[in-house]
Amino acid sequence: MTNARILIVEDEAITVSALKRELASLGYQVAATASTADEALNAVELHKPDLVLMDITLAGTVNGIVAAVAIRGNFHLPVVFLTAHADDGTMERAVAAGAFGYVLKPFSGPGLKAAIETALHKYQTEIESRRASTRAA
């Protein structure tokens, strides 16, 4: 889904700049950026992105996993985690939070695109399944 609007939630400015360039080169739009969980929740409400690309370790007191749970619960959006942490515990917490994808830093364009496209497809399938369930009920 090229042209998808993506919210970047990342507290490292250099990574935000690299992500903006890479996402633009892949045909995506950056809807907004945020560096804390609170900023992310406000940005989702204000900019209505198609997907959230979320770092797990954020500035502030709330981490990306907690923020993702709030975004999924309140806005039902797909969240792809972007992190330098490849340990099993972090990955398990991300999966338990309802992650639609997981990208390790340093990221690559093809890896980023694969994670985003997979997440968007999974999300679209989830929406269609909900609609079918609603019609059947």
Image (tube, rainbow, N blue to C red):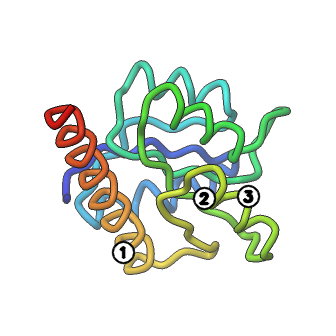
Mark 2 or mark 1: which is in front? 1
> Which residue is located at x 41 percent, y 19 percent?
46
Residue 75 at what x, y percent from top left? 44, 28
Residue 126 at what x, y percent from top left? 31, 50
**How would you rate the neighbour count of disc 1 (Cα within 10 Å): few for under 14, some for 14-19, many for 20 or more?**
some
- Whichever of labels 3 and 1 marks the residue nearer the N terminus, that label is 3
Q: What numbered label is drawn on residue 15?
A: 2
Could you tell me the amino acid type at mark 3?
Arg
> Which residue is located at x 58 percent, y 58 percent?
81
Give the camera-side residue of 3 and 134. Answer: 134
Residue 55 at what x, y percent from top left? 65, 53
Q: What numbered label is drawn on residue 114?
A: 1
Q: What numbered label is drawn on residue 28?
A: none
Give the camera-side residue of 105 and 63. Answer: 63
Where 106 sits versus 73, above or below?
below
Separation of disc 2 and disc 1 at Cα? 19 Å
Q: Quadrant of the N terminus?
A: bottom left
Could you tell me the amino acid type at mark 1?
Ala
Residue 98 at what x, y percent from top left? 56, 52
Where 56 sits versus 89, above or below?
above
Q: In which quarter of the image is the C terminus?
A: top left
Q: Is residue 110 left or right of residue 129?
A: right
**How would you rate the neighbour count of disc 3 (Cα within 10 Å): few for under 14, some for 14-19, many for 20 or more?**
few
Q: Give SS at disc 3.
A: helix
Q: Is mark 2 in CB contact (under 8 Å) with mark 3?
A: no
Q: Give SS at disc 2.
A: helix
Q: Name the residue under label 3.
A: 93
**In the rendered picture of this protein, how many numbered marks are placed on residues?**
3
Mark 2 or mark 3: which is in front? 3
Specify the quadrant of the image occupied by residue 67: top right
Separation of disc 2 and disc 3 at Cα? 23 Å
**How would you rate the neighbour count of disc 2 (Cα within 10 Å): few for under 14, some for 14-19, many for 20 or more?**
some
